[in-house]
Amino acid sequence: MLSILKSECYKLLKSKIILLVLVIPFIILPIGMIDSLDLEDLNQWYSKLITINLSYGLLVLPLITGVFAGIICRYEHQAGGWKQLLTLPVTRGRIYCAKYIVLVLLLLVMQILYPGSVYLIGIIEGITDPFPMDIVWKITFGGWIATFPLIALQLWMSTVFKSFAAPFAVNVIFTLPTLLIINSEKFGPYYPWAQPFLMMNIGGNIEELLFILL
């Protein structure tokens, strides 16, 4: 398994995925500069977080998992890479697990940059309220954990489809209805594309976060 992980890391260095990991969190900068929701008598950071996560949790996180999964499987789909790889003394399960671990770590690095982006927005806009560090870190790691089922699904699709566009198109198709599905108490919590937003959502009552990890 260790040798497979080393091989995956070497292939990542040859791709531009690392650049994407570093750039994606700063996409929220223009999103955060949009007029926030007007929440009276509340810390201004809360309205910023709600505004940012409406786009970041609903769209960016679900879509970027598909992009990362497609990139990490691109080499195997070229010139019979899967056939060459499976001739080696490794199982399909180990290959899948290695790619899954790498994807999880990539998303972790991306999420760790999220608080910095939020804080930068506050500095630019001159927010003077105390920065809710504990809440920001909870939604950061909560959103990361919520991507685990989606990463598994996206990785499976990327190994099945040879075309990069096919799994990405499927991802987009299932991401778009998320705005409607999150309003369903019955289906929302079990819909993989909705889970990142639900785990990062502060909700109506600041004291009752949907993602609280006890």
Image (spheres, rainbow, N blue to C red):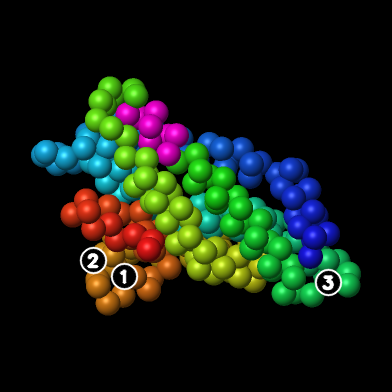
Mark 1 belongs to which amino acid?
A: Gly
Give the CA separation, mark 2 to mark 3.
44 Å
Circle on res. 183:
2
Give the CA separation, mark 1 to mark 2.
7 Å
Question: Farthest residue in the front direction?
Answer: 214
Mark closer to the chain start, 1 or 3: 3
Q: Quadrant of the N terminus?
A: bottom right
Mark 2: few/some/many CA within 10 Å (<14, 14-19, 20+): few
Marks counted in the figure total: 3
Mark closer to the chain start, 2 or 3: 3
Choose top left, top right, bottom left or bottom right for residue 128: top left
Mark 3: few/some/many CA within 10 Å (<14, 14-19, 20+): few
Left or right: residue 89 versus residue 41 is: right
Identify the residue at image location x=21%, y=37%: 43
Give the SS element for disc 3: loop
Identify the residue at image location x=45%, y=62%: 146
Identify the residue at image location x=38%, y=63%: 214
Q: Position of residue 172 (x, y in %)?
A: 44, 59
Q: Position of residue 135 (x, y in %)?
A: 34, 47
Circle on res. 90:
3
Mark 3 belongs to which amino acid?
A: Val
Left or right: residue 94 versus residue 139 is: right
Circle on res. 206:
none
Between 177 and 33, the one nearer to me in the picture: 33
Q: Is residue 177 visible?
A: yes
**To which residue does mark 1 refer?**
188
Mark 2 belongs to which amino acid?
A: Asn
Magenta region: 115-122
Whether residues under marks 1 and 2 lie with C-beta atoms below 8 angstroms apart, the answer is yes
Q: Is residue 161 visible?
A: no
